[in-house]
Image: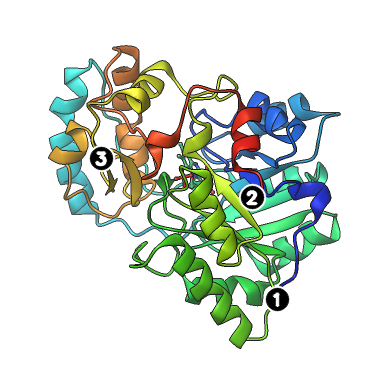
Amino acid sequence: MDATLPVDLFGGGVVAAPMAGGPSRPELAAAVGAAGGLGFLAGGYKAPEALAAQLDAMDGGRPFGVNLFVPSPAEADREAVLAFRERLLPEAAAVGADVPEPRWTDDDGYPAKLDLLLGRVPAAVSFTFALPARSAVTALRAAGAFTLQTVTGPDEALAAAELGVDALVVQHPDAGGHSGSFLGLPAFAGTLPELVAAVRAALSSAGAQLPVVAAGGIGTPEAAAAARDAGAAAVQLGTAFLRTPEAGTNAVYRAALADQDFARTALTRSFSGKWARSLENGFMRRFADAPAAYPVLHYLTAPMKAASVRAGSPERTSLWAGTGWRGAHDERAADVVARFAR
Ligand SMILES: Cc1cc2nc3c(=O)[nH]c(=O)nc-3n(C[C@H](O)[C@H](O)[C@H](O)COP(=O)(O)O)c2cc1C
């Protein structure tokens, strides 16, 4: 039998995914919590002080989670990055932006943010992009946090279970935003329910009892029900919350999500150097061959992306979206929680 999720935290089984880069702000996490879901703050790309300010804003409210990007060893081919940078210069110039010099090492301030969370312990902490140190998981759990690890396949699930986290977020390649895969490409060939079943089978044959939260491409209550039928104890939705008034999604991004002219999403490394799913725009098509160099490319493209948004154009900015994006509506976060609750 699987372990279950604590009802006081996971309520009706809907988790609002942490969404770094603006969408996951305290208003969204609070509204999701008040509606009986589990809201998340996104620690990624934020200075520790900025994350602390968001924790302050959550004081006194419902329980919530915080997500951290775990740094992994840099994998940048310097020549490929410099060639990418040369090609980026005219793209950035087209929206009046510069391209900075490459920043070859960056840990996203992870150690300081981990310390912050050990001092101001949220109800849940989730990790993505790599496995944290065992000592971090042990310390957070001892301090009372419920810990989750994002995995994209059975091998990653077994590695995370071995580390001692409380639950897994099983992320399908249909997910919006970055893949949390740490042992290879986000390459699972089947559906999300099939991925959930494959992970559960692997856990069960290893004798591990861990609840699974299913994520990736869930755009309808039927898709959520299918993930639950496959054994997921909850669903984690990102894209479905992007158009809610409580999310910090910028206006250009919001408009693109509603724009019928965007016909598909695709996986791309062009914005950050790591595979992520976005509505397909011109920049992605022109840079389909971008090298694996996360987060080096993220910092190279950041001024261009910001300038594209300021100019009101969706063509040179990331538009993270899962394959179920047509199911994201302009509705209150509480209504999304209600639609997808068990
Ligand atoms: C805009 C955006 C930002 C995201 N940022 C994060 C993040 O900071 N940390 C994380 O673990 N996952 C992040 N994700 C991935 C989500 O956790 C989740 O896997 C995904 O949203 C599920 O797929 P869906 O968008 O189709 O619902 C992000 C997703 C989106 C759409």
**Are the two marked residues, 3 and 1, in contact with CB atoms closer than 8 angstroms?**
no
Which is more foreground, mark 2 or mark 3?
Answer: 3
Identify the residue at image location x=54%, y=44%. Answer: 237
What residue would you read off at disc 2?
111
What residue would you read off at disc 1?
209
Estimate the spatial distance between the alpha carbons at disc 3 and disc 1, rounded to whole Å.
37 Å
Q: Badge 3 local density, few (<14 within 10 Å), some, or many (20+)?
A: some
Q: Is mark 2 within 8 Å of ligand 1?
A: no
- The one nearer the camera, 303 or 8, is 8
Which is more foreground, mark 1 or mark 2?
Answer: 1
Q: Position of residue 174 (x, y in %)?
A: 38, 52
Dot 2 amino acid type: Pro
Q: Of the two numbered discs 2 and 3 on the same chain, state the one appearing first in sequence.
A: 2
Q: Badge 1 local density, few (<14 within 10 Å), some, or many (20+)?
A: some
Residue 156 appears anywhere in the view? yes
Location of residue 161 (image quadrant):
bottom right
The residue furthest front is: 222
From the viewer's perspective, is 267 left or right of 334? left
Q: Position of residue 268 (x, y in %)?
A: 27, 47
Q: Which color scheme does this rendered protein use?
A: rainbow
* Secondary structure found at label 3: loop
What residue would you read off at disc 3?
264
From the viewer's perspective, is 163 left or right of 157? right
* Secondary structure found at label 2: helix
Dot 1 amino acid type: Gln
Estimate the spatial distance between the alpha carbons at disc 1 and disc 2, rounded to whole Å.
29 Å
Estimate the spatial distance between the alpha carbons at disc 2 and disc 3, rounded to whole Å.
37 Å
Q: Position of residue 4 (x, y in %)?
A: 75, 64
